[in-house]
Amino acid sequence: MPLTTQATPTTYWLEHAWLGSHVEPGVTLQTADGRITAVRTGDATPPPGATVLRGLTLPGLANAHSHAFHRALRGTVQVGSGTFWTWREIMYAVADRLTPDSYYALARAVYAEMALAGITCVGEFHYLHHAPGGTRYDDPNAMGGALIAAAADAGIRITLLDTAYLSSGFGAPPDRHQLRFSDGTADRWAQRADALKEDREHVRVGAAIHSVRAVPAGQLGTVAEWARERQAPLHVHLSEQTAENDACREAHGRTPTQLLADHGALGRRTTAVHATHLTDQDIALLGGSTTGVCMCPTTERDLADGIGPAARLQGAGSPLSLGSDSHAVIDLLEEARAMELDERLRTRTRGHWTAAALLRAATADGHAALGWDDAGTLETGALADLTTIALDSVRTAGPLPRLAAETAVFAASAADVRHTIVGGRQIVRDGVHTLVPDVPTALAESIAAVRG
């Protein structure tokens, strides 16, 4: 059965719970209609009839940046050397082979892997819209619909960030691979995106500008206004590569961040993804407009992109979220600690973020970036989305329970997730997915089908 709100009230007893600022032992959560209806602390033993969750329970994790089909590249792209641009050619080859049916099968398996990693909501940065060559499917949103269905059948929430991708670079026409990404103009993109409906409880629809090189400057405002009118999230790849910055300066005499600001694309509902190569003025523009920033450290290091100025961005006023992007690994705990550890490498000092701050990026701030302001906390009224990390594995055993948050962030991995609950329903129980019982086989078969 796909994701639906729980039919009956359920009581959960949490051996240890992270309540936003600290770890609390013995917490009872009552849930009904998919939401937390009561939070009671000080329960040393489970109340009668409660479902017991042993370990550390967190709000569900939010993966704020995903390209589901990139999961098929894992391993393949580690052969030989190269750059982001050579990696991109391999990625295009996989994209060329996807159909709505094969994309559904792959995404369902990928989202099930996310659920096993404690992720309860994904932001899918979706630009694979049409058939190879650019021919529209009978349903112009067949590919987006496949992703929405896949998330439901894997038991997690999705914000489909429907992406405008119109150019191969600063006004140049799309190349042959990119034809299936393009609607031709931002107006035609908006017409197609208008047909996407938030008619299922697990889905929200947002917008994305692939990058300033992929959407001509004169059309950036169309995408930004579409999102603004709907009060929907707007995401954009920003300054991931120095080559993009150089080309933007040559074409427009300003940085990508300045170009976005000029066309009204920054603001509190906007999230810049990567934001790796920024000027001081860029950081001030992003922070001053409270534009969020999604860091994807495992991808940024896998592609040799560089280390983004996350600490400076947050200090300037940008909320931080985390994503697994290319799915070199799917592990939000690894993304959280990688942000801190990368900053340590760059500065040769420690302690830029507390465990609590990193968990907020992975939970509440990640959900907010995806338009789910009512998720990401263990509070009355919040969506009943949570995940439990084992504290007795070979990675997590030993530290004092009061240090469980530090243990989770700096030692645990996705393999330590024991339970994942979405809308009050257990999607992962004792490390086993309840809707997709054999996730490794689902991944292997769906990836084999698109690798050719």
Image: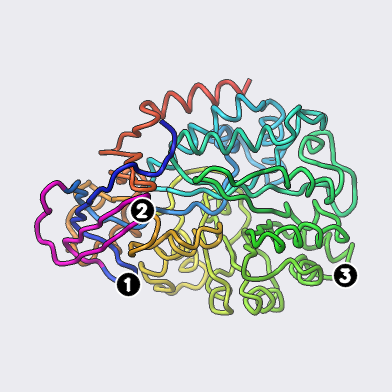
Distance from label 1 to label 2 (Cα)?
19 Å
Q: In this view, does 42 lie to the left or right of 147?
A: left
- Residue at the image position 64 percent from the left and 44 percent from the top: 197
Q: Of marks 3 and 1, which one's residue comes earlier in the chain? A: 1
Q: Mark 2 highlights which residue? A: 384
Could you say whether the residue bearing mark 3 is in a helix, strand or loop?
Answer: loop
**Of tags 3 and 1, which is closer to the observer?**
1
The residue under label 3 is: 253
User: Mark 1 Cα within 10 Å, few/some/many (few <14, many 20+)?
Assistant: few
Residues rendered magenta in the picture: 23-49
Report the amino acid beneath label 2. Answer: Ala
Give the side of residue 204 with respect to residue 153, left or right. right
**What's the mark number on residue 277?**
none
| 361 vs 187: above or below | below
Give the x, y percent position of residue 357: 41, 69
Q: Nearer the viewer, residue 386 or 321?
A: 386
